[in-house]
Image (cartoon, rainbow, N blue to C red):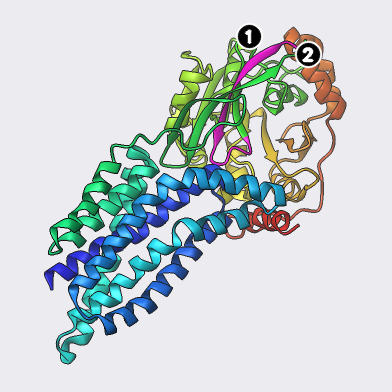
């Protein structure tokens, strides 16, 4: 009985641990949205259910422990192979799905079916088989089944936390799979013939294989750094581009998960990007300062960036505004480390980087003595399909308002599919519950900056401030003033109780996948 309880516990850990690791294998290719998690959980549950059904039949036909041990040994071997074949398979899969426009939904579903379904079917078969062997007295059937069920659930809980909090961030997805497979193989091999111990030996040897690059770079790109953190897969690449004169230059980019969105950029000889990050430097000048009357607004003295990433906005603000105090709030400390090493985020006493979630940071009163107030709060903590719902609600924007100075403004970067304004309408309606003046700048086809303030904001005020700005910022400010306009209407107001942002985003993904 003791051998069965240990086996059930370890197999339970392997099942949920493999599920967590499988989601991380998919993230660099298909992202980490709720629909990807739905595919991951759905495939795992179906595979385990099929395994339970087959396991019951196997147990009735072969009611002996040796057969169960061999089954778990085969499952362990298949599980160890998953990360070794995942990279080449997913590379080919994503190319094929891109050609047929199947999208992340179909791609991730088929990826899970091919990579992880069979090992999980075998893992699922272990529990009913073990239950059959453990029940020796009909009068204690209930307590025996309950005990094994509890042990399997406890193992699943341990596998979830150990994989998510320890193995994936510290040894990576590949070795997470192999460690889980090794634990299963060692328990299963006890009592089997010596020649079968070659399976755990080979799995242990696989731990020595270097993980290499999780996701290969595209043509002409070079991976400088990558990491699987507590929150996501992150990497920095070098990408060749051309500057304003047409000369070739190297640009470093921070990519998260599947890399569809770029979260920070760096070029050697400039702090400007030619993209939406530059807008955070000029939009505060569209806001009237009550203390200055009709005079142009002064440069911001304090900025908080919620979603600091690699520090692209911070680097420019410190360059253009010498008196500024900049609080960069980034939930993922590993991303901040990449920003310092590769993306030029400076070691400057004016810059304080806080490893914290955005909303708890605001709720605590910001930095310092808890009375932090900011002339600008930038929100770049979400981009499709990764939008924490609690950063889209009426209550969140109320907390943002409470942290602003009288001339303060919040500037939100809203990433969206080209031609899709549903997210912008919802966020705009929600912001207007606290900010009477809201304006928008559609910087690119997929990025719109929306500004909200309790003061007054206008294109005319920004245009009047252009001569007071540093020379490098003037073209950006002129472009913003030319396109700054009123807010979109018609969206719903999101609250902490009801913010169906996942449905909105995943609906667009499914729509694209089924075109």
| Res. 435 image quadrant | top right
* 224 part of magenta stretch: no
Instruction: Give the magenta part as a residue range.
Output: 246-261
* 255 part of magenta stretch: yes
Q: Is residue 268 left or right of residue 3?
A: right
Q: Is residue 452 above or below residue 327?
A: below
Work out whether residue 489 or residue 102 is closer to the camera in this orientation and state it.
Answer: 102
Q: Is residue 85 left or right of residue 428?
A: left
Residue beneath label 2, please? 474
**Residue 137: % across, % down:** 14, 89
The tag on residue 458 is: none
Q: Is residue 118 above or below residue 327?
A: below
Q: Label 2, label 1: how many angstroms apart (C-alpha)?
A: 18 Å
Kindly state the secondary structure of the residue where label 1 is placed: loop
Q: Is residue 400 left or right of residue 51?
A: right
Work out whether residue 270 or residue 485 is closer to the camera in this orientation and state it.
Answer: 270
**Residue 18: % across, % down:** 38, 55
Q: Quadrant of the N terminus?
A: bottom left
Q: Is residue 365 visible?
A: no
Residue beneath label 1, please? 269
Residue drawn at 83 percent across, 22 percent down: 479
């Amino acid at each position: 009985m003791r051998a069965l309880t240990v086996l059930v516990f370890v197999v339970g850990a392997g099942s949920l641990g493999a599920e967590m690791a499988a989601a991380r294998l998919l993230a660099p290719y298909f992202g980490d949205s709720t629909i990807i998690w739905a595919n991951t959980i759905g495939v795992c549950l179906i595979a385990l259910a099929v395994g339970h059904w087959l396991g019951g039949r196997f147990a009735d036909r072969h009611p002996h422990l040796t057969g169960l041990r061999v089954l778990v040994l085969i499952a362990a071997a298949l599980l160890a192979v998953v990360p070794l074949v995942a990279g080449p398979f997913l590379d080919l899969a994503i190319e094929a799905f891109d050609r047929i426009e199947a999208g992340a939904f179909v791609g991730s579903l088929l990826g899970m079916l091919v990579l992880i379904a069979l090992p999980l079917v075998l893992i699922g078969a272990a529990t009913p088989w073990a239950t059959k062997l453990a029940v020796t007295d009909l009068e204690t059937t209930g307590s025996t089944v309950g005990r094994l069920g509890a042990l399997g659930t406890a193992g699943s809980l341990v596998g979830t936390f150990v994989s998510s909090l320890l193995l994936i961030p510290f040894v990576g997805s590949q070795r997470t799979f192999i460690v889980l497979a090794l634990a299963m193989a060692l328990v299963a091999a006890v009592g089997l013939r010596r020649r079968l111990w070659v399976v755990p030996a080979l799995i242990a040897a696989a731990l020595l294989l270097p993980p290499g690059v999780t996701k290969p770079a595209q043509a002409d790109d070079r991976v400088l750094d990558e990491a699987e953190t507590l929150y996501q897969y992150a990497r920095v690449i070098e990408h060749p581009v051309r500057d304003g004169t047409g000369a070739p230059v190297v640009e470093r980019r921070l990519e998260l998960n599947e890399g569809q969105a770029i979260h920070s950029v760096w070029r050697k000889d400039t702090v400007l990007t030619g993209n939406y990050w530059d807008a955070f430097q000029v939009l505060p000048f569209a806001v009237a300062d009550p203390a200055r009357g009709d005079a142009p607004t002064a440069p911001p003295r304090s900025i908080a960036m919620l979603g600091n990433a690699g520090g692209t906005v911070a680097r420019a603000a410190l360059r253009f505004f010498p008196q500024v105090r900049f609080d960069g709030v980034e939930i993922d400390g590993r991303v901040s480390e990449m920003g310092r090493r590769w993306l030029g985020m400076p070691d400057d006493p004016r810059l304080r980087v806080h490893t914290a979630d955005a909303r708890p940071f605001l709720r605590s009163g910001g930095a310092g003595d808890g009375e932090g107030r900011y002339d600008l709060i930038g929100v770049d903590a979400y981009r499709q399909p990764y939008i924490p719902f609690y950063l889209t609600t009426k209550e969140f924007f109320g907390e943002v308002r409470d942290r602003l100075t009288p001339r303060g403004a919040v500037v939100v970067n809203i990433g969206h599919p080209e031609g899709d304004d549903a997210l912008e309408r919802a966020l705009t309606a929600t912001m207007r519950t606290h900010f009477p003046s809201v304006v928008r700048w559609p910087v690119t086809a997929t990025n719109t900056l929306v500004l909200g303030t309790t003061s007054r904001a206008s294109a005319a005020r920004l245009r009047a401030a252009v001569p007071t700005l540093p020379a490098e910022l003037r073209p950006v400010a002129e472009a913003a003033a030319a396109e700054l306009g009123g807010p979109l209407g018609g969206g719903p107001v999101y609250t902490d109780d009801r913010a169906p942002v996942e449905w909105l985003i995943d609906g667009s993904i499914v729509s694209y996948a089924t075109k």
